[in-house]
Image (cartoon, rainbow, N blue to C red):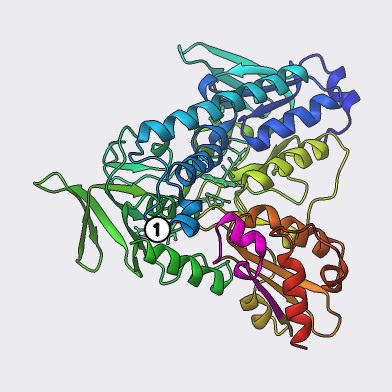
Amino acid sequence: METGTAEATADATYDYDLVVIGSGPAGQKGAIAAAKRGERVAIVDRHEMVGGVCLHTGTIPSKTVREAILHLSGFRQRLHYGRDYVVSERISARDLAHRVQAVVTREVEVVRNQLRRNGVTTLAGTARFVDPHTVEVTEADGTPERVRGARILIACGTRAARSPQIPLDGVRIFDADQLPALAELPRELIVVGAGVIGLEYASMFTALDIKVTIIDQRPTLLDFVDRELIEALGYHMRRRGATFRLGETVASVGVDAQGRVEAVLDSGKKVRGQALLYTVGRQSNADLLNLDAAGLTADARGRIAVDECYRTGVPHIAAAGDVIGFPSLASSSAEQGRLASAHLFGAPRRATPAELLPYGIYTVPEMSMVGRTEQELTAARIPYEVGIAKYEELAKGQIVGDDTGMLKLLFDPTSLRLLGVHVIGEGATELIHIGQAVLALGGTIEYFRDTVFNYPTLAEAYKVAAHAGLNRL
Ligand SMILES: Cc1cc2nc3c(=O)[nH]c(=O)nc-3n(C[C@H](O)[C@H](O)[C@H](O)COP(=O)(O)OP(=O)(O)OC[C@H]3O[C@@H](n4cnc5c(N)ncnc54)[C@H](O)[C@@H]3O)c2cc1C
Ligand SMILES: NC(=O)c1ccc[n+]([C@@H]2O[C@H](COP(=O)([O-])OP(=O)(O)OC[C@H]3O[C@@H](n4cnc5c(N)ncnc54)[C@H](O)[C@@H]3O)[C@@H](O)[C@H]2O)c1
């Protein structure tokens, strides 16, 4: 196996020390990490996709839409001014798209500048392997160019999974990749697939008083999330008019004679609505890479297998991000890209252990977690105690207009070591990092009891929960 910068740069037959396929979080961070070491790096992506799914159709657009909805609907102020309070009487798809466009344009600039400043060459086009060191980059006009890399990082990510039974038109029947470009908001929406994407969008739309029906073949929602949080989410969404049809599989989708979208379920039922969002998972882009030519294979779901150093079966080729599967998050993909790049150049770094990865789920209300759930601890027969703080007990909860949030600490009743943190409510995805730090450092919940937090803050929930937990012992 080739390692070390010297051998790679000494070999004049390579155009680059590293060629990166895909400019999402994994590709970007992998490319920049190598460039910072002084390597010659090229990154390949279609011109209009620089920044990846993360920037153009995934994380950034969806979180911007969420923020725009919460702002324009006056959702956060309803505790103070009543459930009918709105900031803008008519919220259109154009209002949301305008905000997405502004954020994406700015972020694309940031990504392009970062790559340029670090001397990374951007090659516009789609890459496919010709041999294990050569990729052919085909530009939009069809012109091919071949580049040779001493090392290659595959970070080609995913696209929305599609099915011939679901005739997407991007107007009435659409997937998450098409949603940010919608011309009109429906008054009622069917969401097929209650994974993270489906639930995030479904809950955002209920905040706009759009009538949402959520269908999923599984009987329960997001099994990796604390059950109390899921119950709370379901309660809030139902209160805003959402209907859940769980344990039901969608067999096909069509449009009826009245122009209404109709989802036909395996059970024979039909669910009708004005529009349908299809979010049943993601499909890897590895099928477009001609992996055979590189001596690589992907599994049935298009995922490329890697070892703990992100190396594929071909030692000079690494893979990172969604194309390697779990956990398929922008946050972890970026870190995997950095680590893969470091390993490729023989400078290994330690990865964050999986149990310390935080999850942020931007439903309304948002949820976040780190460490273990009650279900996992019970299954592993690990004794635990619980400390809960409700936002209604916090002055800041009242101030920001959230009196339904909750923070839950799970800890060892003997050693008092923190085992898990689960939060639902305003600021959950930010708050979680306090718990993550204590968990990573092997701390106990006495830390929260003995620390002075700013007042008034939502972070104070840690102290309230720690006291509540200790009182139960
Ligand atoms: C709707 C939605 C919301 C999400 N929200 C969150 C969130 O809130 N938080 C979070 O952490 N994660 C979120 N995610 C997941 C996150 O977006 C992904 O985990 C992340 O984008 C994966 O990064 P990546 O680098 O693997 O690839 P991607 O971001 O998928 O980028 C891959 C890039 O590779 C390019 N590419 C593919 N094939 C080729 C080829 N042959 N040649 C050249 N280029 C190629 C593509 O054009 C694309 O630009 C969300 C995803 C979606 C869809
Ligand atoms: N905040 C975040 O971190 C965030 C946000 C969005 C997306 N993501 C990432 O994106 C990835 C993809 O998310 P996703 O929600 O598309 O996929 P998913 O695989 O998580 O969920 C798809 C859901 O669709 C259901 N389903 C599949 N076929 C069906 C059918 N015919 N009828 C009814 N239900 C059906 C499945 O049971 C499943 O619950 C996730 O793995 C996640 O990591 C992360």
Closest to the observer: 48 or 74?
A: 74
Residue at 65 percent of width and 21 percent of height: 112
Residue at 49 percent of width and 43 percent of height: 71
Pinpoint residue 192: horizontal percent, then vertical percent. Answer: 35, 55
In the picture of the structure, the residue carrying the numbered disc 1 is 83
Pinpoint residue 77: horizontal percent, then vertical percent. Answer: 49, 52
Report whether 83 appears left or right of 411: left
- Local packing at callout 1 (Cα closer than 10 Å; few below 14, some 14-19, many 20+) is few
User: Is residue 320 visible in the rendered structure shown here?
Assistant: yes
Q: Amino acid at mark 1?
A: Arg
Does the stretch in magenta take in 194? Answer: no
- Secondary structure under the numbered disc 1 in the rendered image: loop
Q: In the rendered view, would you say 440 is above or below 342?
A: below
Q: Quadrant of residue 443?
A: bottom right
User: Is residue 311 visible in the rendered structure shown here?
Assistant: no
Pinpoint residue 134: horizontal percent, then vertical percent. Answer: 65, 23
Report whether 28 appears left or right of 179: right
Residue at 73 percent of width and 82 percent of height: 384
Q: Quadrant of the C terminus?
A: bottom right
Residue at 39 percent of width and 57 percent of height: 193
Pinpoint residue 182: horizontal percent, then vertical percent. Answer: 35, 35
Report whether 150 appears left or right of 62: right
Magenta-drawn segment: 386-403
Q: Quadrant of the N terminus?
A: top right
Closest to the observer: 20 or 151?
A: 20
